[in-house]
Amino acid sequence: MQTLVHRADNVSLYLIPDSTTVDMTGTHTRVNGPPGPFVIGDVATSALRLYTDVTTGGGDDSRVLRGTSVKARTAKEGESGSFWVGGGYTYDGSSWAAV
């Protein structure tokens, strides 16, 4: 996995599959695949950092972020099973923490 974090506080804004390319230019950041393609227009590229080879624990995000005791909430009926919430965790390049 990959994650885009805000440089100022390491808050992870997006969790992105390895198969998706991320283009970070001087003016914008473009995510070129699932769940996109989309352009991140509300945060300057200079304020973002992209981490690759991010470990989330394996298999459907494993319900626990590796290196923490952060456990997933249980999905309610009709919801996706994923527990990921942008802005809910920090990542410093090696470990996760809940915000």
Image (tube, rainbow, N blue to C red):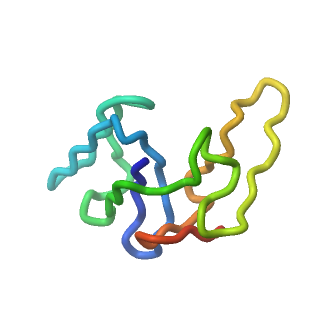
On the picture, is 7 further left or further right than 80? Answer: left
Q: Point out residue 87 in the picture as x, y percentages from the top left corner.
A: 57, 58
Q: Residue at x 34, y 46 (%)?
A: 41
Left or right of residue 88: residue 94: left
Name the outermost residue toward the front: 58
Using the image, determine if residue 70 lies above or below residue 19. below
Where 50 falls versus 17 (above or below)?
below
Point out the residue furthest to the left here.
26
Q: Position of residue 83 (x, y in %)?
A: 68, 45
Q: Quadrant of residue 71?
A: bottom right
Q: Residue at x 49, y 56 (%)?
A: 55
**Residue 90, x across and y down, in percent:** 54, 68
Quadrant holding the C terminus: bottom right
Number of marks drawn: 0
The one nearer the camera, 20 or 32, is: 20
Residue 70 lies, in percent from the top left, at 71, 63
Q: Residue at x 50, y 66 (%)?
A: 11
Residue that appears at 37% across and 54% down:
53
